[in-house]
Amino acid sequence: MLRTPLLRRLCASASLTAAVAGAGLVATAAPAAAATCSDVEVVFARGTGEAPGLGIVGGPFVRALTSQLSDRSVASHAVDYAANTSQTSAGPGASAMSAHVRSVAAQCPGTRFVLGGYSQGATVTDIALGIRTGTTTGTPVPAELAGRVAAVVVFGNPLGLSGRTIATASPTYGPRSKDYCNSSDTVCGSAPKTGTGGHLSYATNGSTTAGAQFAAGLVRAGGSPTDPGPAPSTCVRDSTRAHVAADRAVSVFGRAYARGSRDDLGLVSSYVTVSLRAVDGGWERVASC
């Protein structure tokens, strides 16, 4: 028979072990927190050399848009990419932007997106929209999610060096886009001028406020948060090479075929232009957009 002091020690030890084990079971069984879905999410890419986050332009833009949409919940996401001085990080940044949109769209079917960027971050946005920039390549936002993008706003977009803007380069997103290029901003070059100052003036010359007003108007035009309305039909007219790069088509022995329908688009070339319309499961060739 055990002596009383020893018995007490053994019982106390057993009780402590059971308590710890029980606490572990409770902790393990705790449910994961549910994803919080906002009415609108801003996905913004900062400029070259800026510290991780929304950056000197993205921060004021998000605050202005949140104020403009005070009756709705607005969240923001800073694209996680290197923003290096060689500009080679724009492609991976575009893939990161697209991946985030896909992830949130799958979890939050009622959330609409406002995409944007500043400087190299604008290039990130261009590539995510399927625009060829001549720098690096990345994965664009899937065609089936194009209708979830309410607006696109960029500042100091290097695409302007070729005389283009998103409005002229993207039939899909152009009508929902706004490029801001200051009069003395050599980064956006020959793009149409929308404000005064240089490359560092967008946060202080009213451009972020104007961009927020533009985006807010398009968000409201899309309907109430509980009634998103039908997604617009997506049609893209571009070169067969651009269709392949944007994954709307595949290349087989030098010829392009629409993804899904397998419609023959002709040779893969920057000079062969065709129109593709989004359909269930992919794309089909149409006469025009």
Image (cartoon, rainbow, N blue to C red):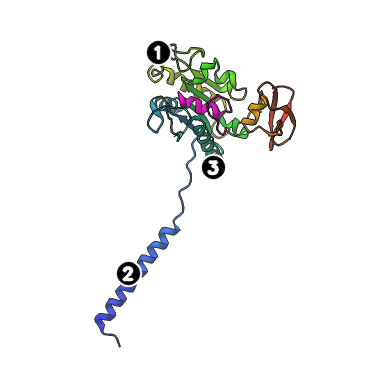
Q: Is tag 2's residue or tag 3's residue first in the polypeptide sequence?
A: 2
Q: CA distance from mark 2 to mark 3?
A: 42 Å
Q: Quadrant of the C terminus?
A: top right
Local packing at callout 2 (Cα closer than 10 Å; few below 14, some 14-19, many 20+) is few
Residue beneath label 3, please?
107
Q: What are the residue bounds of the magenta stretch?
A: 119-140
Image check: 173 left or right of 261? left
Q: Amino acid at mark 3?
A: Gln
Asked if the residues shown at circle 1 and circle 3 are in contact, with their CB atoms under 8 angstroms apart, the answer is no
- Farthest-out residue, front: 253
Q: Is residue 234 in view?
A: no
Residue beneath label 2, please?
16
Q: Amino acid at mark 2?
A: Leu
Task: Indicate the position of residue 157 as horizontal and vertical percent values.
Answer: 49, 21
Q: Is tag 2's residue or tag 1's residue first in the polypeptide sequence?
A: 2
Q: Secondary structure at mark 3?
A: helix
